[in-house]
Amino acid sequence: MKVIRDPVHGYIELDEIALSLIDTPSMQRLRRINQLGLSNLVYPGANHTRFEHSIGVMHLATVLTSQINSVTVNEKNELRAAALLHDIGHGPLSHVTENIISRYTRKKHDDVKDILKRGEISDILDEHSLNPANIAKHIKGESAIGKILSSEIDVDRMDYLVRDAHYTGVAFGLVDHVRLIHEMQFYENKLVVTPGGLKAAESLLVSRFLMHPSVYYHHVSRIAETMCTRAIEYLIKNRALDPFELRDMDDARLFETMRADEGYAGELAQRLDERRLYKRALYVGFNSVGESVLRYRGNVGRVEVEIAEIAGIEPESILIDIPKAPDIAEMKALIKNDVKNDDQMLRLDEASHVVATLELAHKDNWRMGVYTPKEHRDAVGKAAREFFEAKKTTKQFRLNEL
Amino acid sequence: MKVIRDPVHGYIELDEIALSLIDTPSMQRLRRINQLGLSNLVYPGANHTRFEHSIGVMHLATVLTSQINSVTVNEKNELRAAALLHDIGHGPLSHVTENIISRYTRKKHDDVKDILKRGEISDILDEHSLNPANIAKHIKGESAIGKILSSEIDVDRMDYLVRDAHYTGVAFGLVDHVRLIHEMQFYENKLVVTPGGLKAAESLLVSRFLMHPSVYYHHVSRIAETMCTRAIEYLIKNRALDPFELRDMDDARLFETMRADEGYAGELAQRLDERRLYKRALYVGFNSVGESVLRYRGNVGRVEVEIAEIAGIEPESILIDIPKAPDIAEMKALIKNDVKNDDQMLRLDEASHVVATLELAHKDNWRMGVYTPKEHRDAVGKAAREFFEAKKTTKQFRLNEL
Amino acid sequence: MKVIRDPVHGYIELDEIALSLIDTPSMQRLRRINQLGLSNLVYPGANHTRFEHSIGVMHLATVLTSQINSVTVNEKNELRAAALLHDIGHGPLSHVTENIISRYTRKKHDDVKDILKRGEISDILDEHSLNPANIAKHIKGESAIGKILSSEIDVDRMDYLVRDAHYTGVAFGLVDHVRLIHEMQFYENKLVVTPGGLKAAESLLVSRFLMHPSVYYHHVSRIAETMCTRAIEYLIKNRALDPFELRDMDDARLFETMRADEGYAGELAQRLDERRLYKRALYVGFNSVGESVLRYRGNVGRVEVEIAEIAGIEPESILIDIPKAPDIAEMKALIKNDVKNDDQMLRLDEASHVVATLELAHKDNWRMGVYTPKEHRDAVGKAAREFFEAKKTTKQFRLNEL
Amino acid sequence: MKVIRDPVHGYIELDEIALSLIDTPSMQRLRRINQLGLSNLVYPGANHTRFEHSIGVMHLATVLTSQINSVTVNEKNELRAAALLHDIGHGPLSHVTENIISRYTRKKHDDVKDILKRGEISDILDEHSLNPANIAKHIKGESAIGKILSSEIDVDRMDYLVRDAHYTGVAFGLVDHVRLIHEMQFYENKLVVTPGGLKAAESLLVSRFLMHPSVYYHHVSRIAETMCTRAIEYLIKNRALDPFELRDMDDARLFETMRADEGYAGELAQRLDERRLYKRALYVGFNSVGESVLRYRGNVGRVEVEIAEIAGIEPESILIDIPKAPDIAEMKALIKNDVKNDDQMLRLDEASHVVATLELAHKDNWRMGVYTPKEHRDAVGKAAREFFEAKKTTKQFRLNEL
């Protein structure tokens, strides 16, 4: 039993299984994967990694399972292993490369069955009689106890919210995760929040809501990340980067690969290195462009070409970023009704007016952006407004926000 | 210039005026007034006082005014004095005695004109050419800059939310008050939040919402406080306590007065000292009793007698607590619209779906209680249910919550 | 099993024994005893009580014993009870009344055998087969496991250092108590620090060293506390206060008793209420007056009379405060030597140069004070210097410090 | 004026000069330089960078100069620029490459005159009439106000101590830097601590003392860093790395360069990536080997060869790490004597027994290490003991520590 110091949770105990797993190359790679992608361009302290997050998630999973009697020691060990390994499928810069990798390799970041079955990890699991198939299921939240790791209200979210708050310095992330974990139980094979945990559950959801525009969707990191994904796509199309290899890279290797390019990707890499980012030419919410704008998500390239034409510049100088519509899965988490002698369960959004409004509230925060180098800002802004005005499907339309 | 160490804001500078005002008996009395009444029966750390809160409010008011150019030095000094003195009208145990004092003396806790005009405080204000009438207005939020102290979003709330969080250990109180203050300005003689402060303002309101049931309306402190107010009323009716003197007492003197009584008040005091509190016989929300129950607020005594009769016990053994309906004044705070070149103002609840839902959400949290000694719990519970069932005005009624 | 929220340690679990003991009048009284006496005159946040400290000590004792295999469940329960009850012998204002109570009643604050044997506490201990004699020994550190509570490095000190830091806002109190507890073991029936805990043990001692002059011996609280003890002595001598009753009072009752006096004690009480404190007329260290000044400790009254005579004022206007010489018991704590295969133990001051120097360093911080109302400061300062100059036993003497 | 969120100091204001300097490639490179080298192998949270540290130092320098009247606006701007730029001369992994770069290029990390005179930085300084020569002097602490940045007690140390504590989670780093800065003044053109700052200054020194063995000289990071420097030296000798280019690299580029090597450096890089570190074969302090061992510092290569010979293995498998002797420059910081009317200054070690003992205490913590792959541990341990036994110059010698 070894003990490690975590700035968020204090001392965390690592047993022999954890120690062995941590020392595998797959886990060590996570030391070199930034938890928050390029958010450190906005929050200079946000340099924390998937590695420490994974240890934190294992810690919280251990605490939660310790209060559940129905789980066997072997199941606990499998869940702890799953917690530790839950992010080994992440590519460099975490979510930044997630869509690209998934598109080219058909593997989402929680599809890790193949990684669990190879090399040292496989040996360690074998040695301790831990079943890789079970662990893969836990990671995807496809088993009952896997809900602890991946479900509407899981320890993954709890760890990243408090951890991201610690490193960005943003106060909003403060969730009473200790209380929330204390108030979670299995009931009829489902992970539920007990009535005493309602306020803590609300705090988790509200905290995520407040963190979204301030941290996760801050326009500066969003611009940098759009620049980065565009450079990666360019490299893949030019066969300078293999998407299957991308999945195993660390942040540094990805940047070296981008920098080595002599074309568009190299230019974007240099801009990122020197923080000469594209600027917002248009930055508007649903109340300006309507939700129908989401239909362009799969094909922003064509829109970029059209706007470039109107503006009279190269399409490479335009990046359109249309985030997906908010989906607040946590709202569907179950809470035991607080009516005595009545164990029926409610969804969180049925139990709480605040939770019920969060989907709408998240929509308030949604923004799409059209980004371009500083010198084209006016031209592209004008062109983009012209384009979207023409396509508008509703009348209550305003496009002069920034 | 002296410097004082505050656990919440770090070092706070006190100028000569502040130092003189602090050393008056009226301010020193606040050292002996608990900020959170009897919440320390639930949160053992909640022993902080109105004194440190007042210094904290002065500090935040100083920071906010420092970024407003239109305010003169003299106005700033008056506002700082008002911030420091804003709670000198509070009776013992803060809000616990507020209604009683107001009922008997016609003075709310922010009616402090009389205190400002007497004794040392008057001399100090005079010496530094500070106008007591202006200060009294600032404290009531009846002047333009007084809105900094008392309005929908004021520094009073900011200080108490972060301070109460620090001392109770409850995480929910964490508001980004530094950012919020930074994003407040005067516009057309109104205190408004600038667009960059919307998230911080939301965090303030949500934080208050989460703190309400966990701290401010926790049933245990609510029971203790109801016991305490009942003892005070008993003493006043028996001429053992003068309500005008009550207003100038500290917590200890009030308790000594209650303990000295040989009847009902003394008995309640002993119960509080030994933490033998009344228990909840009925504890229900609007979805059980309907909002029409609020009509009993002015006259719970009669309801207590009726229920006592049904239960066959003494009315003294029943305490009914019907809190007032939630009123979320902060929702009306103004925010400058984020549309470019358009300085029109919106109310916070117009700018934010989360804020718009808070009144409803606060109603979810509202609870009325019928409290009684342990041994009468079943009988009183049954009687109370019978009483309220008979009086119910709507059909969607359930009375079995606890 | 109930859970309580502590701002310092987070959630603390209370079992049935703890819950019963907490609800006794002796424990509830501790809610009304300030942990740091009158330090809140310097640090407005320092209003924490012996009650929460006692719960914190129980928590740390639980953590420490959980890692020691040789202790039986019954012993653990007795130790937890002892931890919870260890301060029930404290009089009002904690250490402020300690010497007086001990002088008149022959009971130190950890002599609690009589309290354990009476009333509800006795019943509860009996009911759970806990031996009051064992508990009394643990509290005095006279048993092996009692060393956890009371010895050179005990959980009492750990709790109060981090707690006092939290409430005063002074950064120095930050000890890595979690690590330190983790590195403590029983070896040959002695509580020892393992080699990996040396740095954490050093941090504990150094933290206490830094807290001493900034908090525990800050001259302003020292003046207020000297005024307070003098008022108490006056009341006892005038039979207005019984020292045995004093031991059972809370802070408020003591203050009410002082305020009720129409003579010297009442005058001092009013001064304390209004913060019109005596001032330092002389405030010097050993390098000025030499350690021989300690010979006056038992008899400062006579010195006060002599100095009053020289200054031509009433002796009541002079308070002399000669603290005892520093005694750094922690230095004698044992640490297992870090030489392999060699389990001999060293004292901390043998293992660490920093610890070895602390006694000397504490002497640097030692100060004696002669206090007097503002208006007599010059006269008393001059007289006191004259008095001590004449008595000086060494030549390297300077008396002009302040 | 822009505002940035720092997890350590809260909001930090950046003026136009700061914003321009931050966006230069030299400053942006610091985003990619770990503040604590390879300490993240021990403390997973320690991923903070020289970039945020530089902004923090600028912030503290701004606070300190704001309270000094004698400094002109232009001097303040130069000092702020110097604070921001003070670490641009650091190579990858901060101190890890410091000695190598200095040996080969004759440039220490604070020799930055050449960098200030080239490219964008030079333009920006010129544009705002800031003198690069002055700034270079400030960074080296060779001017009066430069002492704020680089001297016995400077803002550089204050920032890194609290920042390293935040990210490692180690409690020891908590210095009351706000108080310390408040208590610093210029007196006779020297930066001195005023008497009220003595305790805060002691806390700074003691904090550094406690952080040393726990963080800065933790054996695991020391082993990793020794492996890393050895790989770099190998690359330089094999002309695979130019030391002048090394100085401008970031951490990722250095690792890529090491990984690309097919010999010894590549092997060490892979070990670091997979955390297969060398182990301690010998790890002893001065009380074992005596201070005379320091004579080998310049030539550990020869010793490695000799020990390898005794052990019968390749010299590459042995790494000897002999840190320099502790030098506690802070002890020489000046403090104004607290004797009234006497402005003479004392050195901190004259004013404080604790400070006076720190050099000795730091020597207690000093350790040299002989590191080797796991499989050679016994053989190398035996050989190293044999070697140093034979060379010992004193008799009080023990070599069985670990």
Image: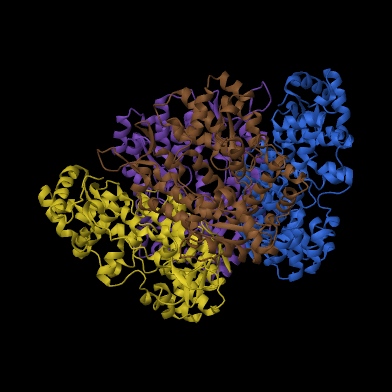
Chain colours: A brown, B yellow, C purple, D blue
Q: Is residue C179 visible?
A: no
Q: Quadrant of the C terminus of chain D?
A: top right
State the residue in front, A164 or B343: B343
Q: Is residue B7 above or below residue A260?
A: below
What is the quadrant of residue D197 in the picture?
bottom right
State the residue in front, D123 or B95: D123
Q: Count the numbered circles shown.
A: 0
Q: Residue at x 47, y 63 (%)?
A: C316
B109 sits left or right of B372 in the view: right
State the residue in front, A400 or D153: A400
D191 sits left or right of B256 in the view: right
Q: Quadrant of the N terminus of chain D?
A: bottom right
A230 sits left or right of A173 in the view: right
Q: Residue B328: x, y in percent?
A: 36, 63
Q: Residue C148: x, y in percent?
A: 50, 33
Q: Residue at x 74, y 30 (%)?
A: D270
B149 sits left or right of D287 in the view: left
Q: Residue A373: x, y in percent?
A: 69, 60
Q: Residue at x 68, y 44 (%)?
A: A232
Q: Is residue D273 visible?
A: yes
State the residue in front, C221 or B169: B169
Q: Residue at x 26, y 50 (%)?
A: B270
What is the quadrant of residue A371 in the picture?
bottom right
Q: Residue D81: x, y in percent?
A: 75, 61
